[in-house]
Structure formats: C-alpha cells, structure tokens
Image: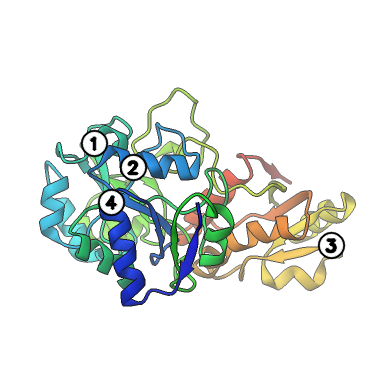
Amino acid sequence: MDTQIFKPTQDSIRTACDIIRNGGVVAIPTETVYGLFADATQSGACAGIFAAKDRPQDNPLIVHISDYNMLKEVAAEIPEDAMKLAEAFWPGPLTIILKKTALIPDTTSAGLDTVGIRMPSNPVVLEIISKTSLPLAGPSANRSGRPSPTDAHTVYEDMKGRIPLVLDGGDCKIGVESTVVSLAGVQPVIFRPGYITKARLEDVLHKEVLLSKGITEELSTDEKVLSPGLKHKHYAPKADVVIVNADFEKYKQLVESENAAALCFDEYADRLNAVCVCYGSEKDSAQQAVKLFHCLRKLDEIGAGKVYAMMPSTEDVGLAVYNRLLRAAAFRVVNL
C-alpha cells in the first residue's frame, strides 16, 4: 500500500472522509497525539485499525464524536455526571466510559458493554467527524507497544505501507493521550491519567474520583480492562529503560558508573558525564508530557542501550507522565 502524507487542505480532508466512508483507516492529528481513525460503527473498518497497529484484540478503541447528538447515538446511558464533565472539558482531552448502544460493535469495544467516548478539540479531526457524520474509533497512530506519535513524520515511520493517508497537522499540543474516566460504575474511576487531572474532575463532580490500580501497577495478562493503556506493553522504545527514584548525586553515580544514557530533566544535563536526552523541566509536568514520547523515540535514534530515567512527579499532570514512563520501563523502578 502506498502511504501518502498531506497537509490538511479541503482536498485532502475530502479524501480522508472518502477513505473513512469506504471502510478505510486514516491518520489524523488531535490535540493529544495522532490517531488512526475509522468508522466506529463498522467491525471491518475497526479491524483495519487493529491490523495496522498489530494491536491486541482485547484492547478497546475510544470513539470520537463531534456533537451531543452523536453522543446519544453511541451511549446507552448518559448520567448527570457525564454531562457535567462534557460541559466542563469537551471539546478536549477527556474520554468518558459509558454503557454503549448497539451501534458500537464488539470489535470496537473489545467485547465490552461499555465504550470510551471523547470529543476532541483539534479542528481537523472535528471537521472530519462532522463531515462524515460518523463516530470514529481512534487509538494512537503507532505500531502497538511503541511510543505514541506527536508529529506526522513519526506516524509515517510506523504506518508506511499500512494505511493510505496521513494528514500532517503539525505537532500535537498536549503530547499524552486523553484522561480516561469511567462513569459506568457506582463511583467515577480514572483508568488512564492525562492532562485533565483527578483534582479538576473532582472540582466539577464535587465527589471523590478513584484511581485504578492499573495506573501504577502491572495487571495480570488474564485481567479484563475497560480502557486502553492499562494492560498491554505501551510506549516503549527499543532501548532498555529503567526509572530511578533518587536524589541527583545518587542518580549521577548510577548513570556514570554503568556508562548508561540519561533520560533526564533539562536542569541536570550539563552536570552529567553521559549521553543525555532531556524531557523537559523538572518543575513543568505539562512540558514533560509534550516532550516525553518524542524523547523516548530519540533514545532509539541515538542507539541508546541501557537508559536511566529521572523519576517525574506523580502530582497533577505528572501522574500521566509517570504512568507512560512506567510502562515504557516495563514497571522497573530503582529506589536509591
């Protein structure tokens, strides 16, 4: 298959809409990361996403909508809390898990009776959803297990020959996937942290929002999950990454004694006698989120073997950064 890459013009957007209407898959930018989009209502179209990514079949797809009428088509139940969150954060980087309607096939939801729903804010993907009049399934546009792409060139590297079209909308503004919160149970539960934090959700709902254990703990292979990003290997470069929870002097000693590469904060690069890839300021978790996936891929570009990563904060957006880095490191953390 010949994969083309175009800027999002009216002609290329029309082409993308035609491909999607005909059951194909297109890579489109969102505000979080680039996604692989197809008709969420067609099993065959969503099977194309799984095939392009080599994605495990038990990993559900998030459904993207452009208006509230579409929400009613895909969600069987829309509780008051869902509308509160939608009004506060949509369009934006928040996915809400709700009971699904029969319009969403089991292929899309990985056999679950629930589905994650999001209204993205990027104008390109919103326009395509609106013009096709279809809810679109859209996981990140990378080969399964690899760091998610935040620019079109990275998508092209992973998807060349696998999909017909990549729309190049520039770099993504947020850099990590959406927050996923489930409202399908008795109490709200975050299954994947993101830019919309626990505290912000609680401010809107005026109730406690729980954190799934899968955010910071490895789940068993037979455990069924409601959200992407919980069970399978994710975000990992080829390099061997280990997180180090230590003060700087102990971190420096470990990196230099083992001649390892450092995935570190900007403030420390000139104090390390090592190959350094910097993923933002220690004090700016939002900046770390924007840079993390690009830096994980850069480790492979420079041929890094063993990599010791500085431990990020686990507060606010930092929890999303830690969650992605933890999975990239296969849950290996060294406490010094």
Neighbour tally class for label 3: few under 14, some 14-19, many 20 plus, Cα within 10 Å: some
Disc 2 to disc 3, C-alpha distance:
44 Å
Q: Position of residue 115 (x, y in %)?
A: 26, 41
Identify the residue position indicated by label 4 in the image.
22
Q: CA distance from mark 2 to mark 4?
A: 12 Å
Which three-letter amino acid code belongs to the residue tagged 3?
Ala
Residue beneath label 1, please?
105
Dot 1 crowding, Cα within 10 Å, few <14, some 14–19, many 20+: many
Label 2 crowd (10 A; few <14 / some 14-19 / many >=20):
many
Chain-order first, disc 2 or disc 3: 2
* Residue 103 lies in quadrant: top left
**Which structural element holds mark 4?**
loop
Q: Are marks 2 and 1 in contact (CB under 8 Å)?
A: yes
The image quadrant of residue 160 is bottom right
At which x and y percent is residue 135?
22, 53
Label 4: how many Cα within 10 Å (few below 14, some 14–19, many 20+): few
Residue position for label 2: 46
* C-beta proximity under 8 Å, tags 4 and 3: no
> Which is more foreground, mark 2 or mark 4?
4
Q: Dot 3 lies on which element?
A: loop
Query: Could you tell me the amino acid type at mark 2?
Result: Cys
Tell me if label 3 and label 1 are in contact, CB under 8 Å.
no
Secondary structure found at label 2: helix
- Visible in this render: residue 99? yes
Residue placed under numbered mark 3 in the picture? 274
Q: Residue at x 87, y 49 (%)?
A: 258
Q: Nearer the viewer, mark 4 or mark 1?
A: 4
Give the amino acid at mark 1. Pro
Residue 255 rendering spot, x and y as whole percentages: 82, 54
